[in-house]
Amino acid sequence: MILVMDNEVRPGYRYLAPEIARFLPTAEYRVYVDEPFDPDLDAYEGIVISGSTASVYDEEHADWVETQADLLHRCIDERVPVLGICFGHQLINRALGGRVDGDRRRATFVEMSDSRQDEILEGVNPVVPVLHADVVTECGKNMIATARTDYNDYFCTRHENAPVWTVQFHPEFTERVAGQPSDWNGGNYSFDQCNATRVLRNFGEACSGV
């Protein structure tokens, strides 16, 4: 079982994390921000830290952000696989001493480049969907960049020693939910060029292989 923790603070925007669970082989979906909890790591093969319209540096969310940072350290110590998506990508890097800064809002397809060999990105096309306004500007300790874009050098990262991966894009964002964000614009790309959901399949396989 893979635990999907929904970090969305605005109930009307909770349409993405359920999609994460839908693409995983076996998943337990829970809204973390309503009732922060301390999961029994022995009960899960892996954990997904979802996106959010919150920012990791917002003081009003510091309590539950810090408890997730503590959970990340437990997962690293116990070698429980973790996937951070968008906000989760930022939270993981910041929890490990990295830096996250505000950028501009992007709701479109972007193209990754300089992808390094990484099992989570295996088979993933360069065109991926993003919905974010913050970026990682410095990797956390033991995190290395595995892909970049023309506006960010730390677009995807992984831990050097532990089964921890992060992606700034949303692998769960497909045509099925593309009508939800009012500002989505695919630009010069289309969903026909995107197979980002492969990330979730890769993560599921990585969890079963640990």
Image: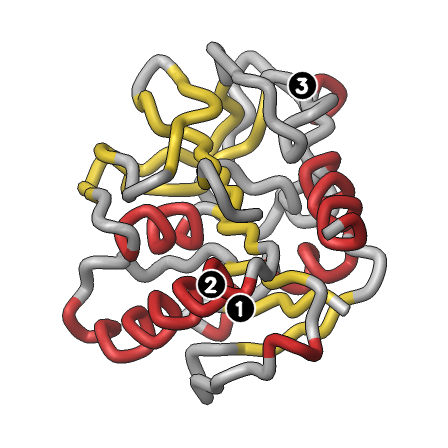
Please state which of the two labelled residues, at mark 3 or mark 2, is closer to the viewer: 2
User: Which mark, residue 134?
Assistant: none
The residue that disc 2 covers is 77
Which image quadrant for residue 45?
bottom right
For the point 49% across and 78% down, the residue is 32
Q: Are marks 3 and 2 in contact (CB under 8 Å)?
A: no
Whichever of labels 1 and 3 marks the residue nearer the N terminus, that label is: 1
Picture layout, residue 33 above or below residue 118? below
User: Which mark, residue 125?
Assistant: 3
Please tell me whether mark 2 sits on a helix, a strand or a loop. helix
Please tell me whether mark 1 sits on a helix, a strand or a loop. strand
Picture layout, residue 37 above or below residue 54? below
Whichever of labels 3 and 2 marks the residue nearer the N terminus, that label is: 2
Q: Of the residues shown, which amino acid type is indicated by label 2?
A: Asp
Picture layout, residue 202 above or below residue 5? above
Place of residue 178 in the rendered image (x, y in percent of width and height, measured from the top left) = 63, 43
For the point 63% across and 43% down, the residue is 173
For the point 48% across and 84% down, the residue is 38
The residue that disc 1 covers is 6
- Left or right: residue 53 versus residue 63 is right
